[in-house]
């Protein structure tokens, strides 16, 4: 039988055991809390991931991981004055740096400054005067605002703006409008007319090009809209194209509207040596283009109704890859190298001689490679006549691929690749090139400069 002292001893032991348990639980809880993510830190990291840098040695939007949405626009210059062209590029650069940072195209307190206003401001500054923004130096809702406002409150959504110069900036209708004819790079050639091309003039070429990419379609459109507003009386829209790419598992290759993975054989944007070899212009180009790249844009309509009637095996023979895995024919995984020497039991090439991937392969083109940023497009339906049997005519999808390809020199890049492909590629019975252009995208700019500035500067000697 327990004594009172024994009972007290047991109670004290039980109390200490419970206390130790509570202390251990508290320590565990504290450790768990210490390991939990800091909400403020997570928000900051998330916010940083929404921004892509604008300033730098290269323009962003080239070696940038692919965003989900595209708004591409080409402009024709309507001015005859060189200084208005440089003022436009300065205004565009300033607005682009602001919008990619998540700010309005122009400060809210400043009414819309089209190029004429920018030039007046520059002249006042050069004269040592205080720039006069007009009667509305404070935010004044009775005047045109410096930004149309539809992106206010939205994330910048990894917006990038990439600018390109078409041949018309240098010479147009045999006229050297801006004294730049001698600055035209040798690589900025006129694209040849390839077999099967059905280019629509109103959807082809342009003096200036803007590629806006973002993870939000409204952000991309907003950016181009602001640039067009700033260009009033200096440049006008010639054509535009939207595009999209599907969300994929990180590291995955997006699929195009034909259902195949698109971009597997790209040079690696994280590999500086590959980018320098295939994408960035080197010492062979003019100084203002070194670190830039040449962009070939092609609007490619796909006869999806025709394609959808084909058996999967035929589609795979046409492309040269397995539809579901993305692996080259005869291989098991997407990123295995093409085996162009492989033959089947009958001695036939496993990857057909006129398949898309064989004709596009670097091994078939003296090592030529280009960096592709593929976007699908869907512009509804239209009355169309197919190029190949059964020559169906009627209402079909106006949809396909907006092909964007960056390269160090288009003569040894896209032109070399597509000369053979346009003649022999099995895919030609399903695709038609209907628009696009070639643009010289200069090097990036440092803060205080504008895109392409060095092209306008006096040359030594």
Image (spheres, rainbow, N blue to C red):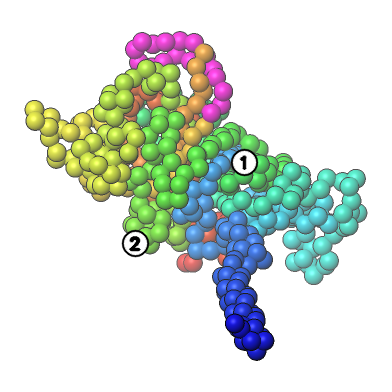
Q: Is residue 166 magenta?
A: no
Front residue of this view, candidates 363 and 418: 363
* Residue 60, above or below 421: below
Does residue 258 appear in this view?
Answer: yes
In the rendered image, residue 333, in percent from the top left (x then y), is placed at 28, 44
Q: Residue furthest front?
A: 1
Q: Residue at x 38, y 43 (%)?
A: 263
Left or right of 129 in this view: 354: left
Left or right of 137 in this view: 155: left
Label whose residue precedes the other's in the sequence (1 or 2): 1
Front residue of this view, candidates 153 and 176: 153
The numbered disc on residue 4 is: none
Residue highlighted by disc 2 = 273
For marks 1 and 2, give the one nearer the viewer.
1
Q: How many other residues sit within 10 Å of disc 1, few (<14), some (14-19) or many (≥20)?
A: some
Magenta residues (range): 378-394
Q: Residue at x 75, y 66 (%)?
A: 126
Q: How many other residues sit within 10 Å of disc 2, few (<14), some (14-19) or many (≥20)?
A: few
* Residue 186, above or below 435: below
Q: Residue at x 34, y 61 (%)?
A: 273
In the rendered image, residue 282, in percent from the top left (x then y), is placed at 38, 60
The numbered disc on residue 217 is: 1
Give the image quarter of residue 313: top left
Q: Secondary structure at mark 1?
A: helix
Front residue of this view, candidates 299 and 181: 299
In whole angstroms, how far apart are the C-alphas of marks 1 and 2? 33 Å
Q: Secondary structure at mark 2?
A: helix
């Amino acid at each position: 039988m327990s004594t009172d002292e024994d009972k007290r001893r047991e109670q004290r032991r039980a109390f200490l055991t419970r206390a130790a348990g509570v202390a251990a639980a508290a320590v565990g809880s504290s450790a768990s809390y210490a390991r939990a993510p800091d909400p403020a830190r997570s928000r900051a990291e998330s916010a940083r991931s929404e921004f892509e840098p604008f300033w730098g040695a290269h323009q962003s939007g080239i070696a940038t991981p692919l965003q989900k949405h595209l708004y591409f626009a080409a402009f024709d210059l309507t001015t005859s004055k060189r200084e208005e062209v440089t003022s436009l590029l300065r205004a565009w650069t300033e607005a682009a740096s602001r919008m990619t940072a998540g700010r309005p195209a122009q400060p809210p307190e400043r009414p819309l400054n089209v190029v004429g206003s920018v030039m007046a401001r520059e002249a006042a500054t050069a004269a040592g005067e205080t720039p006069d923004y007009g009667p509305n130096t404070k935010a004044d809702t009775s005047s045109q605002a410096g930004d149309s406002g539809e992106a206010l409150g939205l994330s910048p959504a990894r917006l990038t703006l990439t600018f390109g110069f078409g041949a018309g900036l240098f010479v147009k209708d045999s006229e050297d409008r801006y004294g730049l004819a001698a600055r035209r790079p040798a690589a900025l050639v006129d694209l040849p007319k390839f077999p099967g091309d059905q280019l629509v003039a109103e959807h082809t070429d342009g003096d200036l090009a803007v590629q806006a990419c973002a993870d939000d379609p409204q952000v991309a459109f907003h950016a181009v809209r602001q640039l067009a507003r700033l260009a009033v009386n200096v440049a006008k829209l010639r054509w535009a194209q939207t595009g999209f790419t599907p969300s994929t598992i990180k590291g995955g290759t997006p699929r195009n509207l034909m259902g195949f993975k698109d971009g597997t054989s790209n040079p690696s944007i994280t590999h500086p040596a590959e980018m320098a070899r295939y994408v960035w212009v080197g010492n062979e180009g003019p100084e203002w283009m070194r670190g830039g790249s040449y962009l070939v844009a092609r609007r490619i309509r796909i006869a999806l109704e025709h394609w959808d009637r084909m058996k999967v095996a035929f589609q795979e023979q046409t492309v040269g890859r397995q539809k579901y895995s993305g692996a080259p024919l005869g291989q098991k995984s997407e990123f295995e190298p093409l085996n162009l020497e492989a033959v089947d039991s009958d001695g036939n090439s496993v990857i057909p001689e006129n398949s898309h991937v064989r004709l596009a392969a670097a091994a078939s083109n003296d090592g030529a490679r280009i960096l592709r940023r593929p976007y699908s497009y869907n512009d509804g339906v239209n009355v169309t006549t197919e190029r190949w049997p059964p020559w169906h005519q009627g209402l079909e999808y106006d949809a396909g691929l907006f092909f964007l390809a960056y390269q160090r020199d288009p003569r040894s890049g896209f032109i070399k690749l597509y000369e053979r492909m346009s003649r022999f590629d099995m895919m030609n019975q399903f695709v038609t090139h209907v628009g696009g252009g070639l643009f010289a995208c200069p090097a990036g700019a440092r803060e205080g400069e504008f895109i392409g500035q060095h092209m306008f500067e006096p040359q030594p000697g």
